Amino acid sequence: MPNQQASAGAAAGAQEPAGDPVQYRGHILPLDGLRGAGMLAVLLFHAFFDSNYPAAPGSWQAFLIRFTSLGAAGMTMFFSLSGFLITGILLDSVEKPHYWKNFYVRRALRILPAYLLMLVVLFAGHFVSGRFVLACLLYIGNMARLVGARSQEYGVMWTLAVEEQFYLIWPLFVRYVGRSKLLWLTLAGVVLTPFFRLLLASHGIETFLNTPSNVDCILSGALLAILLRNGTIHRGNIRKVSRWLAWVSGLLLLPIVLIALHGFSSRPVTVFMAAFKQPPILGLFAAYALWAVARHRKGGPAPSRTLRFFVFFGDISYGLYLVHQLVFRLYDKYTVHSVLGGFNSNFGLLFVRFLITSLIATGIAWLSRRYFEDLFLAQKNRLAPYKGDPQKPSVPEPGVLPGMETS
């Protein structure tokens, strides 16, 4: 649904007794804003850190580029947001008619139109091989070598592969595993996955693209959705839990940020970062999500200009995520013999490249959302309505991104 319909629902009022599950309905604007902020962080990451700009060690340019490396945390957060929203939808609709149809039809309407169009553009423009397109159609873009392609022919596709592989099986667990067992299964995934990454990293095995290495990112959001629904986190303690998570996660994240900013790259540090940089980020997301849910009220104050800015990018984040790397490639191709093509040795031109490509990609994403994606989103309630329940699931039907969800 468009953001103009945001805040259509409400959290339960103060009369709700402590211990009862927190009821939250409709769009939660701060979560839309968080999605937008994460998209901008990823944009900065790809624009600067991925540019291979030869900044002199110790220079302010080198520090700024290392700072943009923190934008990769946006992808960790996107996975968690996806797990939170989709698990909430599954839990709320598990006893309703047409569980499978509603879930997969609504996801297909959200994901496939822009995704398939992007694959057509990439293949027609000779940006990717036919084998990579096949991998993406099979949602194994993060394992494209299985069909003879490179997994990074178009980098952003790996996150969509991770999510869709996970969500092919996750509805089965939600449907057929009891709530109590599901809780413990989810908690085990959150706790054990970092140690699995440690095992892989210590043997020099890549931990970035494969799905099992990212399970804790998605399951952390799922765990939050479960705890909100079973009453473990309730109106009486939600703010306290949020503050506790924020403090603990912030303290744990501090050394990781310092390592990233100083550019340490010894093998022990590399192994540590590969294995344990995600949990503090996931904790901060959980703290923010709980804060947002606790504040969610029908007819609350109008969002600030800052929030509206980030909500705008959250609204177009799916299209922006899909297209921004293509815009970078086209810019590099057509400016290589012009003055603008000197960004590899001129930081000012690198910044100009970021501004121009970001504006173009944002415009394309806005047009896609308004005149293409929304045409399909408008069919969700007709083709896959939530029947048998006077209210729809307690969170808006999400779409996907690098783990990014957008209604």
Image (cartoon, grey):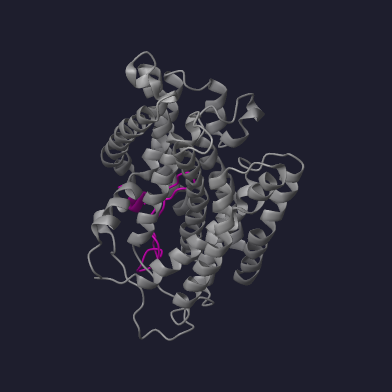
Q: Is residue 377 left or right of residue 266?
A: left
Q: Is residue 273 left or right of residue 300?
A: right
Q: Is residue 97 visible?
A: no
Q: Position of residue 173 (x, y in %)?
A: 61, 59
Q: Position of residue 229 (x, y in %)?
A: 50, 72
Residue nearer the viewer, 289 or 219: 289
Q: Residue at x 28, y 40 (%)?
A: 366
- Magenta run includes residue 319: no
- In which quarter of the view is residue 235 placed? bottom left
Q: Residue at x 56, y 58 (%)?
A: 253
Q: Is residue 69 visible?
A: yes
Q: Position of residue 295 (x, y in %)?
A: 35, 71
Residue 21 against residue 172 in the figure, above or below: below
Query: Residue reaching furthest top?
Result: 337
- In which quarter of the view is residue 192 placed? bottom right
Q: How many marks?
A: 0
**Magenta residue span:** 378-407
Query: Residue reaching furthest right?
Result: 203
Query: Residue reaching furthest front?
Result: 58
- In which quarter of the view is residue 351 placed? top left
Q: Residue at x 24, y 56 (%)?
A: 305
Residue 330 against residue 252 in the figure, above or below: above
Residue nearer the viewer, 103 or 13: 13
Residue 215 against residue 117 in the figure, above or below: below
Q: Main secondary structure of the magenta part?
A: loop
Residue nearer the viewer, 261 or 276: 261
Q: Position of residue 121 (x, y in %)?
A: 40, 24
Q: Residue at x 51, y 32 (%)?
A: 56
- Magenta run includes residue 380: yes
Q: Is residue 273 left or right of residue 222?
A: right
